[in-house]
Image: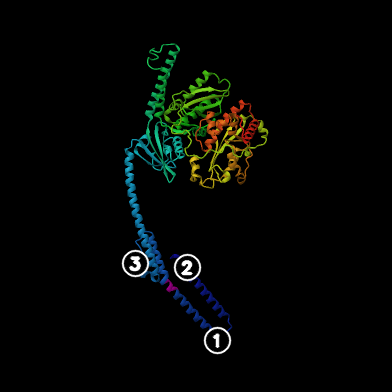
Amino acid sequence: MKAYRQRATMVLSVSAILYLVAVALILESFLSSPVSPDGAAGAAGETAFLILCASAMLVAAVFGIFRLLVDRPARRLAADLAAVLHGGPGLSQDFSRYGVLVDLARTVDLLASRLIDARGREDQAIATATGAAETAKARLAAILNDLQEGVVVCNARHQVVLYNQNALRALHVGGELGLGRPLFGLVLKEPVLHIFDVLAHRSQTGPQTAPFVTGTADGRTILQGRMSLVRAQGEIEGYVISFTNVTESVQALSRRDALLRRLLVFLRSVVDDARAAGRPRDDPVIGATGDPTDVLAQATADFRALLTGWWPMIDLHSADLFAWVARRMGAGDPVVTPTGLPLWLHADAYSLALALEALIRAVAATTGVGAFDLAAEGDGRFCRILLSWMAREGDADDAREQDALRHWLDRPLSSGLGGMTIADAIGHHSLEAVVITRDAEHSILRIAVPPGREGQEWTAPEDKLPPRPEFFDFDLLAQGDAGMAGKTLLKALTYVVFDTETTGLHPTQGDEVVSLAAVRIVNGRILTGETFNRIVNPGRPIPIQSVAFHGITDEMVTDKPPLSVVLPQFKAYAADAVLVAHNAAFDLKFIRMREAAAGVAFDNTVLDTMLLSSFLDGSTDGQSLDAIADRYGVHVTDRHTALGDSLVTAAVLLRLIDALETRGIVTLDQAMSTLNMTMELHNRGLSLS
């Protein structure tokens, strides 16, 4: 309506301007005409003047009629419609007041009626929903207040959106806990963020809750909690934490554990002394029934089960734990490097991470060492965390090292958890004592922890793809002289061990890479903190058989880059390192077919662990990655992921390098000659065995 009125006003304005121009032209013509003697000019002027007056009256009449019949009704209709839009009851039913716009007014009235009806239905729906929400809120509040645990609900920005009265009591706060306020002013930040990160990256087919231990920000209270994520359409919107105050329980249990530990150690020493003294089996000290060693072993196992059962623990990857410890080190702190093959541990991530951090700082303060390695080892029955550093002259004194170890373990943790010491935090995980050993160059602290429990061992899927073809286009591995690097010892080289997951086994028939991952080896150490891991969009559907093999679905690759984007990133990561893969020709085929599109060339020297193993062990012993890993005692986890296979291959490579040295093969040139010979024999259908 407003636009219509504006257009009409514009037309009248233009007409008025044209009229005034016409009047001006007539007057100018009249004034410039010569006066005739007979008075004809005067008559003409009077006529023109009368015409002008009549025209002016006509324009004024038209303008007045327009304002009366169109402009005023239009303004009235616009005002009434605006009132409706702002909540008015509707248009006036006296449509005559809208003049010639009566048909337009009826149409607008129909639209306004529908708008009012829709608004009424919306108000009713809102009222119903609000009533239901208030009822649900009241019920939820009643349930929360009946719970013995404190409950806090937070959004993804860690702001409190709901809490109960027990949360106030457990946190010993009042006004500090409020809606919209940050959670981290009340509890320690790190354990909450850590468990949030663990759940956020956990498969949604696995458990969606996890226990953890934290403390209040003032460090006076220990809280045992459990977190559950709140998801909507796959996106994390927040989380729920339930917790209880376990300060007194932890202190009492810690005293009990210390007492039982001392008793077991004492009894073991008594039995050992009695045996050493040759006392008979029926001696009361040794015991008349049962082998005392077995009795003590069972008592120790039962105590370990009790010890690790009451403290909240989860399965976690050692690489994640070590990376978190490394990230806590700032400028001027010791450098921590995660190394080795990752394992699954069963632990309280937060207290164990704090213990490792405090232990590293204690060792650094005493020894002056500025660089440490963190690794894990195990055989499926147990796990040990290895903290190692370069030994110095004079550190070989066993008594001195043991005194230093006791001093380190007695240090308190860096924050919270009721003033626990390093020994307390480690003691929650295992009865075994922390021991310190030495090799040729390093001092090593060994900390026992339970292995992961919930099916973390890899087992071959029942319905899987056929194995990769073992001998696949060996021409891709034909390589020239390695140059100066050829004279370098194998243990001194830098390697990048890589692996791919694909849509299938036939790159020349349209199969593509869906994942590319790698890990670096430097000076014989697998640097698990320096990995490369990318999911790749293959530009085609992923067959369901392949999904069952590696777990990567079409949804997972939708927003991922193509291989032409990932390959330059991988080239930058690999630089001039020696590339290593298991059945390397297979992975190289996929990469070489996309080099031109990516604008890169992989001219690195390449080693193949399958061929190296074939040379060492013969082709009859089985050259699959699983078979070689089993043969060389490499613990296998996370198989059939590109990163997991890269890590296993890296561990296998280090074992193979040790085995090659026993054959006198110690340099890269010698290894390359061995590979070339092995490939030639395979091409001829022969074997070294």
Of badges 3 and 1, nearer the viewer stands: 3
Disc 1 marks which amino acid?
Ala
Of badges 1 and 2, nearer the viewer stands: 2
Residue occupied by mark 1 = 40
Q: Position of residue 564 (x, y in %)?
A: 58, 45
Disc 2 marks which amino acid?
Arg
Is any atom of residue 332 visible in this view? no
Q: Position of residue 666 (x, y in %)?
A: 63, 28
Q: Secondary structure at mark 3?
A: loop
Marks 3/2: CA distance? 27 Å
Magenta-colored stretch includes residue 65: yes
Whichever of labels 1 and 2 marks the residue nearer the N terminus, that label is 2
Residue occupied by mark 2 = 7
Range shown magenta? 63-67
Residue occupied by mark 3 = 93
Q: Are marks 3 and 2 in contact (CB under 8 Å)?
A: no
